[in-house]
Image: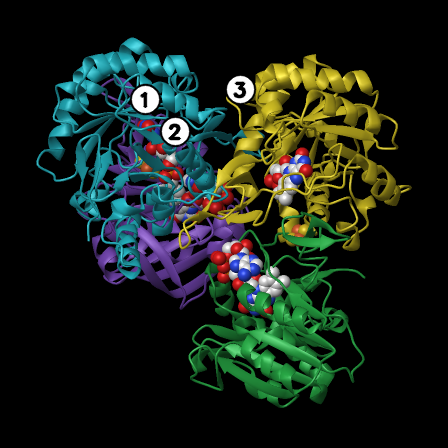
Chain colours: A cyan, B yellow, C green, D purple
Amino acid sequence: MNLEVKIAGVTFKNPIILASGCCGFGQEYDKFYPMEALGGLSLKGLTPNERQGNPPPRVAETPSGMLNSVGLQNPGIDAFLERELPNLAGRDTVKIANAAGATVEEYAYMAQRLDASPIDMIEANISCPNVKQGGAAFGTDCSMAAQVVTAMRKNTTKPLMVKLSPNVTDIVSIAKSVEDAGADAISLINTLLGMRIDISTRRPVLHQNVGGLSGPAVFPIALRMVWQVAGAVKIPVVGLGGIAKWQDVIEMMIAGAKAVQIGAALFGDPFTPVKILEGIQQWMEQKGISDINDIIGSVQPY
Amino acid sequence: MNLEVKIAGVTFKNPIILASGCCGFGQEYDKFYPMEALGGLSLKGLTPNERQGNPPPRVAETPSGMLNSVGLQNPGIDAFLERELPNLAGRDTVKIANAAGATVEEYAYMAQRLDASPIDMIEANISCPNVKQGGAAFGTDCSMAAQVVTAMRKNTTKPLMVKLSPNVTDIVSIAKSVEDAGADAISLINTLLGMRIDISTRRPVLHQNVGGLSGPAVFPIALRMVWQVAGAVKIPVVGLGGIAKWQDVIEMMIAGAKAVQIGAALFGDPFTPVKILEGIQQWMEQKGISDINDIIGSVQPY
Amino acid sequence: MAYLQGSFPIIQKQQFNSDTYSFYIRCPEMAAQTVPGQFVNLKIPGFSLRRPISVCQRDDEVLRLVFQIRGEGTKELAALEPGMKADLLGPLGNGFPQLPPKAKVILAGGGIGVPPLLALAQVYGRNATALLGFRNKESLILEGEFAAECDTRVATDDGSFGYHGFVTGLLERRLSEGPADMIFACGPLAMLKGIADIAEKNQIPCKVSVEERMACGIGACLVCACRTVRDGKEIYSHVCTDGPVFDSREVVL
Amino acid sequence: MAYLQGSFPIIQKQQFNSDTYSFYIRCPEMAAQTVPGQFVNLKIPGFSLRRPISVCQRDDEVLRLVFQIRGEGTKELAALEPGMKADLLGPLGNGFPQLPPKAKVILAGGGIGVPPLLALAQVYGRNATALLGFRNKESLILEGEFAAECDTRVATDDGSFGYHGFVTGLLERRLSEGPADMIFACGPLAMLKGIADIAEKNQIPCKVSVEERMACGIGACLVCACRTVRDGKEIYSHVCTDGPVFDSREVVL
Ligand SMILES: Cc1cc2nc3c(=O)[nH]c(=O)nc-3n(C[C@H](O)[C@H](O)[C@H](O)COP(=O)(O)OP(=O)(O)OC[C@H]3O[C@@H](n4cnc5c(N)ncnc54)[C@H](O)[C@@H]3O)c2cc1C
Ligand SMILES: Cc1cc2nc3c(=O)[nH]c(=O)nc-3n(C[C@H](O)[C@H](O)[C@H](O)COP(=O)(O)OP(=O)(O)OC[C@H]3O[C@@H](n4cnc5c(N)ncnc54)[C@H](O)[C@@H]3O)c2cc1C
Ligand SMILES: Cc1cc2nc3c(=O)[nH]c(=O)nc-3n(C[C@H](O)[C@H](O)[C@H](O)COP(=O)(O)O)c2cc1C
Ligand SMILES: Cc1cc2nc3c(=O)[nH]c(=O)nc-3n(C[C@H](O)[C@H](O)[C@H](O)COP(=O)(O)O)c2cc1C
Ligand code: FES
Ligand code: FES
């Protein structure tokens, strides 16, 4: 049975990737099961300099989901390359660096720094809703998104995946813009902007007032966008948003995703990725599917 | 204890309105409890001519939510005025006609027809994701939204509420456009575009492929948008999207909604509005709040 | 008529085979109003949408529901035990039209479409012929209970019990024995089509009970659309209020 | 050290008052690894996020959790009964630092912050002084169990039991009786601030256990931020891994 998928020249032993911001720099869930079980890891979002992120509270519960407003807390690219990345050396899973910046120049700088690193792939995060400068602004405007990608493309030959924001009127035109600007792959979705208010204090639950919604609640939106984008671009699409069980992965892949990422579901059940892999294999066996690639984009729309 | 709210000159005995498309023409839930218990009813979306809507399946289940793709099935404005509206005569609750069209001219025509009717308020639905022509297109573009409102405004002196789509990059600018064009109130949100796929048949669950997501899953998104819009316009805002319990109503009102609408929650528990009213009253008593208007927009953001 | 909704105790549970269950639920007010062919909309904790399940039998106090595990919701439902409560909304739908009890009727059921016909078997008794189709012997349900009320004939797709073949075969046979005033049918779409065709050919009025995905169950949301032809015009009727029982010449199967 | 996660049986349940409960949960592997001050992250069906609850006591087989109903999640939790299972992830967090058992320590707890200190009372025994604050007599918990281990003094805000006033008052009194090697504190923020100030004034090392909303509980999501000062620089540490126990001079309360 083949679970291997290829994205932008990178081989993933299976299509299950942990989502950025939900698995630190890979060490935490490695304490439950070896990271070698996974197709890949999208590491915590990085910026040129250390960021402390937003004040707490940074998390709120919502029906079948959660809001976060971490705001890209990270040690900065230098500390990452010196202190964190070496811990992943020799570990047999695809390592993806998730990178963000406050300006086009910062994105370009991130690409340049990562180009010289042993990272397998770069994921440009143009969709973080939790930072004031840059972040989402780049992901909600076609020309800004293209500028970021063009600038990064110039500075790296590493496979470049661009992560899109769902907080847009027209996801397809953003996707086409980043494809045209030279992206090798697209991942979507990042979080949807949401809010909760504590009725006893009349204050927002999040100190940032608003935050990013993720978890099963957003799955139908993510699936719709993955389907729309996969049908409109030629580069591979990685689907995420609300995946919690193996059926969700099959749905995403049938819709056109070549691989998927798993975020919030880890917090409820750290073993989600392992259970999903088991479920997928059982399903393939039952259905007599020998290669997972055969189901990608196999949806038959009306 | 005062639960009365005033929106665009119309008095609602309480802030609980049933959402359009979820309560037919008011008769169905009247079999559980008299519609007089409600602040108002937003009736099934109407178009100039009869519409049969989309082929089934028209509904799919999602985590804490549902997708629908009804596609504005309705008997047309004539049949509504002749056969349906008379059934509501003398019933003491605010009757809101929800109107849509495929062109600006059709919207204008709907306003004109409703202007001459005993309806209390018009809700312009510029946000239906389930129809090919018009519908969402009007709600996702500031200038088209404004055109619709301007055209309707010319043809009616009835209070005109405009219902916005959440499938946009910038909800605030759409809201401002319809305010500037003469809307008396804004209601939001309509449904978010989503999808589900049946993995055994590899076909979308909905015959329309995609449909509108509603239910508790969308509540945090709705709340965020209501808060943003209420802070940006001077006309009253009616909040909806995912409301299922009294706490949700309080959150919406604290965020800035003057009233709320309840849709999908009715399907799980038809008594939702009645239970919500009880809950609100108990809470007000406990907190010593004598007028519900005192909490509107009382959120203290960080 | 008012709709009723509430949580009612399951007083008895039967398991017929690996995936089919029967629940007896005490809900006197609802039971008293229910007629054969109507259904209830069942709320299962953790699921957004209610599940429509036909009433199999009723008395003054109790509704009997028979259902099959088809997905996550019915799986959860099957895990309920006597003493626990079920949240029902009902009675819903139009039900089967009522003929004089002496009318000669044919009850044609397939698989999980069989249970709703049992109430009719009780009404028409020996004037009814029940034609029940199942995949195989293992999936056979309620045969004894039908046989106690009326002339009952069983078909299995694989011939492991009764007639080897489909309900349509049993129907042709039954009609060769004599006329009937009406056919009531419930089961998979392919079966309903076959039954409707035979009814048409033989000029026998035929009522079919159809399924469609639902939300409200009471005509408020319009999701449960069903193609029907009325006055020569094709329209979308709604299974929850215009149905689930339609005339076979009216509904586009 | 590996994290553990699984569903484990509740073997005993106690109710202290209208809203406070004690669960004993059999999870030998996890219990064996747990040190005082650590916590578990508890999954409650129907809720997206786990709930962090401190370990109150442990032996080789069993963890004891004491919790208060504060919202929907803890309300559901309180409805679990012996025989049912609880989904735990743990042991999590750093725990209290270990001093020689002969060290003179002060355990300052307020309300639902009291339980995690019981494990310390067992470690330090008669060398510990427990200062326990409650709103009133009704909300008093675990006093007898502390008294069985160590010198125990209780304060209530309304004077309905023990000292009339706050734990800070008890602490001033205790310090007037003689020195201490360390203060361990757990409770509401206002109390922790008061304790930290007194500790600072008296130059006694003070460790406080703090709370923050969590998701993963293991350092992977970075939501549980907590302002701390390290090397003169203010940064956001994370309660689930850098804490929940912080030095009172390090954490910005
Ligand atoms: C009027 C009516 C009467 C019915 N009577 C019975 C009965 O007596 N016994 C019985 O076993 N089944 C009956 N069904 C079918 C039953 O409703 C479905 O099997 C059930 O809803 C499946 O739910 P699930 O969660 O197991 O499946 P899932 O596939 O997980 O459900 C997903 C969604 O699809 C809907 N759905 C799936 N299959 C059907 C279907 N066939 N019809 C309608 N909605 C569906 C579900 O309600 C749910 O909203 C009836 C259906 C209708 C419309
Ligand atoms: C390290 C740690 C140890 C704790 N130990 C205990 C204990 O031993 N006994 C006990 O009764 N309580 C303890 N708490 C507090 C407990 O976690 C909260 O009371 C509980 O999460 C409230 O959940 P809820 O669903 O009832 O409240 P809700 O307000 O409905 O919860 C909504 C969300 O906010 C979070 N939340 C609410 N209050 C708190 C809080 N004070 N701290 C962290 N998250 C919160 C919830 O986890 C949930 O994600 C501890 C908290 C932490 C961080
Ligand atoms: C706590 C948290 C932190 C996140 N941080 C990042 C990040 O640093 N970079 C990024 O691209 N996405 C980040 N995300 C978004 C996720 O990678 C993912 O796109 C989103 O959560 C949807 O997937 P899910 O529903 O599976 O969680 C974060 C999400 C969460 C919940
Ligand atoms: C079955 C269904 C039909 C709907 N039809 C309409 C409609 O005709 N006009 C309209 O403006 N909104 C329509 N809506 C949207 C709702 O009025 C509401 O905006 C949305 O469902 C979000 O609210 P909720 O989460 O409370 O359902 C429909 C929603 C549903 C579920
Ligand atoms: S299910 Fe709502 S109209 Fe039929
Ligand atoms: S809760 Fe995830 S890092 Fe602390």
Does C32 appear above or below A177?
Answer: below
Residue C31 versus residue B103: which sits nearer the camera?
B103
In the rendered image, is residue D147 in sight?
no
Q: CA distance from mark 1 to mark 2?
A: 10 Å
Three-letter code for the amino acid on which mark 2 is drawn = Ala
Q: Which residue is mark 2?
A: A232
Q: Chain of mark 1?
A: A
Residue positioned most to the front: C201
**Chain letter of the residue beneath label 3 in the structure image:** B
Picture quadrant of residue B296: top right
Q: Viewed as shown, does residue C181 lie left or right of C192?
A: right
Which chain is mark 2 on? A
Against C27, residue C138 (above or below) is: below
Which residue lies under the disc numbered 3?
A: B170
The furthest residue to the right? B90
| x, y percent for residue C236 | 68, 49
Q: Does mark 2 fall on the same chain as mark 3?
A: no
Numbered disc 3: secondary structure: loop
Q: Give the residue drawn at x 80%, y 46%.
A: B35
Q: Are marks 1 and 3 in contact (CB under 8 Å)?
A: no
